[in-house]
Image: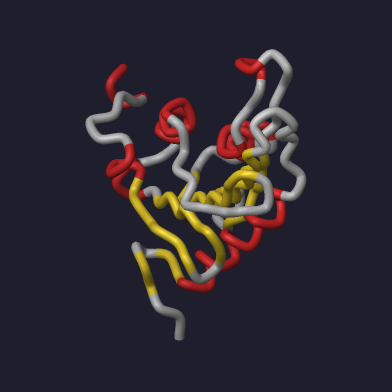
């Protein structure tokens, strides 16, 4: 039986981390050399879940680049997913990995689609070395869709 951490199984945590680490290899980071992969756990139309991956893509015009987390979210939304439970992030300079937290813009984009205290951000060096926080912990007193009702 799997160990439950923050309402998600240890097996799922490892699968998300493995997916994020794998897609990190596709990152296009010729300027910063900081490669990031993200794996988003998204609910599909049948009520099941899929893992949607994304990596960072830099650009010579720095603001035109995109983070791995937003790549995964935008890809998921473009494929019809808009309910998310967790995201794993693996990042670091060159081949080294470290705990990589989503930037402020990525936190706000994630906030658009999730309940902050029920969405888990897994920041991992590898499958056995990770930190889990809720989005609420990373973006306290956030502004979201419910504020516009």
Position of 5 compared to 71: left or right? left
Colouring method of the image: secondary structure
* Quarter the N terminus occupies: bottom left
Give the residue drawn at x 38%, y 57%.
132
Residue 63 in the image, given as x and y percentages of width and height? 61, 16
Q: Is residue 28 visible?
A: yes
74 shown above or below 10: above
Residue 129 in the image, given as x and y percentages of width and height? 47, 66
* Observer-nearest of 39 and 84: 39
Position of 141 compared to 21: left or right? left
Give the residue drawn at x 42%, y 28%.
104
102 shown above or below 12: above
Most distant residue in the left direction: 141
Q: How many marks?
A: 0
Position of 141 compared to 58: left or right? left
Quarter of the image where one finds residue 148: top left
Q: Is residue 80 visible?
A: no
Residue 142 in the image, given as x and y percentages of width and height? 29, 29
Give the residue drawn at x 34%, y 49%.
134
36 shown above or below 125: above
Most distant residue in the bottom direction: 1
């Amino acid at each position: 039986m799997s160990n439950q951490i923050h309402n998600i199984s240890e097996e799922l945590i490892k699968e998300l981390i493995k997916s994020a680490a794998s897609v990190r290899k596709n990152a296009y980071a010729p300027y910063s050399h900081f490669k990031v992969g993200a794996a988003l756990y998204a609910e599909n139309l049948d009520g099941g879940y899929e893992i949607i991956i994304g990596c960072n893509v830099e650009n010579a015009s720095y603001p035109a680049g995109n983070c791995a987390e937003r790549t995964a979210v935008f890809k998921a939304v473009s494929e019809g997913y808009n309910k998310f439970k967790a995201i794993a992030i693996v990042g670091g300079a060159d081949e080294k990995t470290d705990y990589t937290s989503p930037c402020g813009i990525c936190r706000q984009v994630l906030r658009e689609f999730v309940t902050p205290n029920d969405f888990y951000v897994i920041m991992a060096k590898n499958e056995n070395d990770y930190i889990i926080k809720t989005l609420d912990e990373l973006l306290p007193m956030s502004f979201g869709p419910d504020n516009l009702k």
